[in-house]
Amino acid sequence: MDAPKYKWQTVHPVASPRSKRPPSFLYRLTRLYDMLNQKHTAAAIVAALCATSSPIVLADVNAGFNVRTAADVAVSHASHSWEWGTTAQALLELDNNDLSVFGDEPFPNGQIPHADPNIRALAYVKPHIRRDGQTLTEDKAVGDPASMGVSALLLGTSDSVYNGAADRQADYILHKAPKFSNGAISQRADVKELWADNMAMSFPFLAYYAVYKNDRNAMKEVVRQCGLYRDILKIDKFLNWRHIIGPQSQDEGLWSTGNGWAGYGMVRVLYTLQKWSGSRTLHDEQGKLKTWIKEILDGAMLSDREDLGLLRNYLNDAGWFGEVSGTALLSAVAYRMAVNDPAMFPQKYIDWADQNRRALGHQQGGDGVVVPAVNPLAWKDRNKFYGGSPEGQAFMVNLYTAYRDCVNKSICHN
């Protein structure tokens, strides 16, 4: 990174942390059971279950670490565009999963859902979104502001100004940003350069934007762009992707966090494509995304771990320390894909992610910070980062929500 229409009218309430969260699905089942035993009338039972407009909340799980304090650190430490967008996405998955593409029905009636602008994820990111610019915030990177694009579209369901901001952001990426020699959208505005990071910035937003515009061809173009990135960043010698190819910041190493960015970005694109009625029949595109994600996971699973049980900052490079950011996000990818396609991503992927998750749990302090991380602004820094990486902390939330969903689907065990 550079420090360098018609809207569904169900209203989703604020999902406050801890004690004020809406009742879970298990709680409601228990309440129903009690009322049946007490011979309440059918009308009373229906009234009790429908008294709240809150969405079903997935049952919490014990992931081996405190996800709430991890999220709080991400919120307090984020200070750059990609950190704001990444943290907002993590908060959405944590507190309002039904609004994320990982929910059971994220696009009711083929539309993006109406969202309460006061939920934590949107209230958090809203002040960081510029409503009158070409991009969602000023940045030297093409893709980083787009990490807030899904949030902008959700905010647009209650304030159309944010839809306009998202329109301009999409137009900039698609029509004004530089293109690499093969047509891939550059991550940099000043040079033609491809970063694995951009897989989690531009493309999940553009996939969501395709739903917003009801544009099946736009969804296909997002998948094509993912393939163009793979064509450059992956080489035959390795399953994993190189970090950066271009004239300014080239890094041919297999950065673990970069592979996490690429994998999780494609996971979000895949789920968006599958969950939207306008594109769920694009089976060839689904197959490509799954294959590309599997390559990244298979390469990571072949890599060694260091003494703490963490993946190294650069995969297959014994000279590097193990760190939490790449380990967390790649593990989240494994859980998401085990749910998405259990036949293609069988138990060995869950076992690998479980080992990583347990190791990560041992690295969280009482303040919520998980260490050691790679310096989020200097990925080749040989010094371990103990100050709380905003993206690393958000990845811990992604890991938790992926594991929670896997447990709630009865695919993973808690």
Image (cartoon, helix red, strand yellow):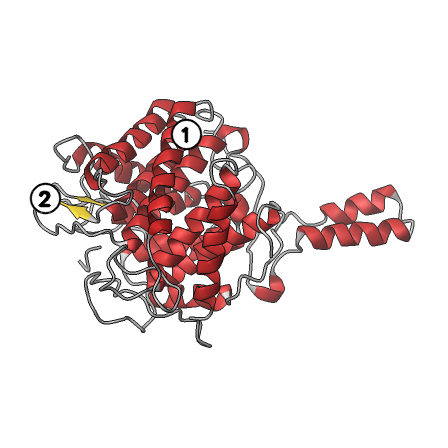
Rounded to the nearest angstrom, the CA distance separating label 2 from label 1 is: 31 Å
Furthest toward the left, the residue is 247
Question: Which residue is pictured at 23% across the width and 37% down the height?
Answer: 229
For this rendering, which residue is in front, 195 or 201?
Answer: 195
Q: Is residue 256 above or below residue 362?
A: above
In the rendered structure, the answer to whether residue 21 lies left or right of residue 172 reads: right
Furthest toward the right, the residue is 39
The numbered disc on residue 286 is 1
Q: Mark 2 — residue?
A: 191
Image quadrant where one finds the N terminus: bottom left
Image quadrant where one finds the C terminus: bottom right
Q: Position of residue 29 (x, y in %)?
A: 75, 50
- Three-letter code, disc 1: Gln
- Secondary structure of the residue carrying tag 1 is helix
Residue 80 in sight: yes
Q: Position of residue 122 (x, y in %)?
A: 43, 52
Location of residue 19 (image quadrant): bottom right
Location of residue 282 (image quadrant): top left
Are the residues tagged 2 and 1 within 8 Å (C-beta)? no
Give whichever of discs 2 and 1 has the lower sequence position. Answer: 2
